[in-house]
Amino acid sequence: MFAKSRFIYVMFVVLILIGIMIPFVAIFRKFNNTLRYWTSSLILFFSGIKPEIIGKPDENANMFIVNHKSMMDIMVLEMASGKKHDLSWVAKVELFQIKYFGLALSLTNMISLNREDRKGIIKLLKDVKDRVENKRTIAIFPEGTRYPKDGFLPFKSGAEIIANKLKLKVQPVVLVNTESFKDMKVIFLDSFDATKDNEWLQESRTKMLDIYLKQK
């Protein structure tokens, strides 16, 4: 009962604060990153959540690859990565069609991905290139969807294809307990330059999963 009540309260906080953020983002577009940072920080504060941050975000990273456990993942990484990283999240196109949440995604210039479109990877490549050229950091969930149970889903190849093609600097990030709203951890691993010469995506998954299971 307590867990359910807390979930409802946290969702209420999320809706209220994102609702407050939307008109400010619409008016002050160039402060998009700062507004998202403070909105995420306030959501965590009023939800009584104080994630432990282990390691540091690489200021030169172009892409964060992140495991996906809950909708809180976004707010947690927005806060933990700081204002020096203007994140551009890759999200499935269906989320952009949600009247309330979709508006926030569109106004903050996030990247939509249509998995049903054969040309989706071409659009993704173009959009990522645009955001990186505009000094934004790509944040992507290689699993493609949330997996609230222990463990990870297989990582899809899209992140690897894009990072290799654009020669991005990638930093894996492990999120722990974001689905439970307590004892959350954000773990920044060592960054590296993407290359076709090794299977870095699967190697990263193995390392991330090992760290995740040890931190649970």
Image (tube, grey):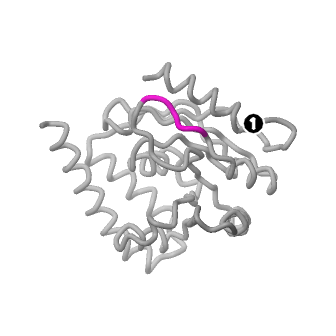
When asked about the image quadrant of residue 174, the answer is: top right
Would residue 104 be counted in the magenta stretch? no
In front here: 10 or 92? 92
Q: Residue furthest bottom?
A: 27
Tell me if mark 1 has few (under 14), some (14-19) or many (20+) residues whose alpha carbon lies within 10 angstroms of its own: some
Q: Quadrant of the N terminus?
A: top left
x then y, percent, for residue 6: 19, 43
Seen in the picture, residue 71 relative to 92 is either above or below; the reply is above
Rendered residue at 44%/64% (across/down): 35
Q: Position of residue 182 (x, y in %)?
A: 31, 33
Most extreme residue toward the top is 214
What is the residue that sits farthest to the right in this orientation? 197
Report whether 207 appears left or right of 8: right
The rendered magenta stretch, by its main secondary structure, is classed as loop
- Mark 1: amino acid: Trp
Residue ID for mark 1:
200
Residue drawn at (63%, 26%) of the image = 207
- Corner quadrant of residue 121: bottom right
Tell me residue 25's x, y (percent). Answer: 44, 73
Q: Secondary structure at mark 1?
A: helix
**Horizontal side of residue 46 vs 142, given as left or right:** left
What residue sits 33% from the left and 53% below the top? 42
Foreground residue among 127 and 136: 127
User: Does residue 136 appear in this view?
Assistant: yes
Q: Which residues are magenta?
A: 150-154
